[in-house]
Image (cartoon, rainbow, N blue to C red):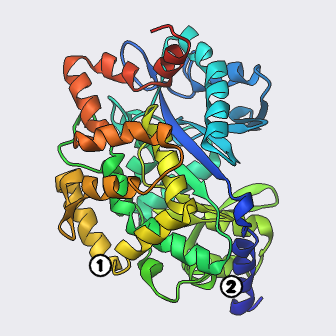
Amino acid sequence: MTYDEKIQKIVDYIKSGEKSETNFKVGFEAEHFTVDKDSLNTARYKQKDGVSDLLEEVKELGYEPSYENGNIMGLRRDGNSISIEPAAQFELAFDAASSIDELFENYKQAMEDIIPIFEKENKLLLQVGYQPKEKIDDIEMIPKQRYKYMYDYFEEFGGALAHNMMKGSCSLQVAIDYKDEYDFRKKYFVANAISPFLYSIFDNAYIFEGKVYDKHNLRQTIWEQCDKDRTGIYSFSFDDDLSYETYAKKILKTPSIFIERDKKEVFTKDKTFEEVMDQDSSTDMIYHALSIVFPDVRVKKYIEVRMPDNIPYPYNFAAIALIKNIFYDEDVLDYVYEKFSDMTYESVQDLKKIATIQGIQALYKEKRIYEWMLDIIDKIEEDRKYIDPLIVLLEKQITPRDIYENLYKDSPQKAAYEFSVNKFIKDINGEN
């Protein structure tokens, strides 16, 4: 297969995601820590009443399980799926929906089913950006082959915080659609332009490796020091000629880490996808190639916005609603595009660096990050009931991290509970 044919294969895959505006949907996934209510220690995969046992119990709610070498690795039922990350972080992904209301109902139903199982085992499903107490070296990896390959690859080729990404972090990721290549280019530009803004307003990491983290936007810093080939912002994101082909070329140059061959995963280390596709250019391989990169804004058959830490309700749905309306309200999208039209790779990287020190107080064009976001939100008309709690935070010039910090200083256990899905479920059931 020629180089151009490989490029076209990836281009065709991305193009196949195009949808008419009437069919636009929004999806999301959220990663959580499972912690003991009292000690705040992270639940291990194999311990008694640990994550493996919890998954087996959740399976009985009507989920279809998937196993690897006899170990439960995921669950699926209509509307949502559950998977586990390298240190047994508990990820729930929700099928894309036409409205935030529909997404919220799906989320609420899934959590109402799951949380009683966690409560029975004295566990919290915790929504923060980093491990709340322990160091990653004290937490073993789950027995999943691909994670072993990733861990080993990052050991040799990754940055200083690559393993922290795998074992220490939890995020909220939102998926949006595009109608054609022009719409894709515009949305991809805007998503990358607002990257430091989303990192900053949804900063929710107060503890890092067992100690108070005295800077901002830990998640951003972790990605910046993870893997220069596949994380952070791609330098072409602000190019006028950005296209499906631009993204496809980047994918072909990326080391593959591992591939699946004869239903087994094979460690391919730094062998690029351009080399790999000489033997296998299947749709499954293209999906893998697009999935094993982790930039701030990732493309599959949709655009993934990947900057927020996981955050508790109502701020999680404020983030989802904000992202949906920035990209689906044409007037808002045009406004943001115009305001950031002169953003460059260099200027966004500069703002990212400043924001790690100053957070939402960081200046861009004589306006602070929180002021920019209030300005953008002011243009949004839909889903205000979800977005309004975020306005309150921004007007107070605080972030979820600040709330967690204040609670933590009183009681780490109280902070964890307040930032858990357990509390959300008790609140909506009137039990708190």
Residue at image location 24% in from the left, 36% down from the top = 402
Q: Is 344 left, or right, of 268 in this rendering? A: left
Image coordinates of residue 222 in percent, x first then y, are 35, 54
**Depth check, front residue: 345 or 240:** 240
Q: Which sits in the foreground, 213 or 369?
A: 369
Q: Residues within 10 Å of mark 2 (few under 14, many from 20)?
A: many
Query: Considering only vertical position in the picture, is 134 above or below 324?
Result: above
**Quick one: label 2 or label 1, which is nearer the N terminus?**
2
Question: Residue 427: x and y, percent?
Answer: 49, 16
Quarter of the rendering occupied by the C terminus: top left
User: Residue 53: x percent and y percent?
Assistant: 64, 20
Direction from residue 397 to residue 317 in the image, left or right: right
Give the amino acid at mark 2. Ile
- What's the amino acid at mark 1? Glu
**Spatial distance from mark 2 to mark 1, Cα to Cα?**
27 Å
Q: Please give the residue where the numbered disc 2 appears in the rendered image.
A: 7
* Number of residues whose C-alpha sits closer than 10 Å to that of mark 1, classed few (under 14), some (14–19) or many (20 or more): few
**Residue at 56% in and 21% down:** 50
Q: Which residue is mark 1?
A: 346
The reply to whether residue 205 is visible in this rendering is no
Residue 218 appears left or right of 280 = left
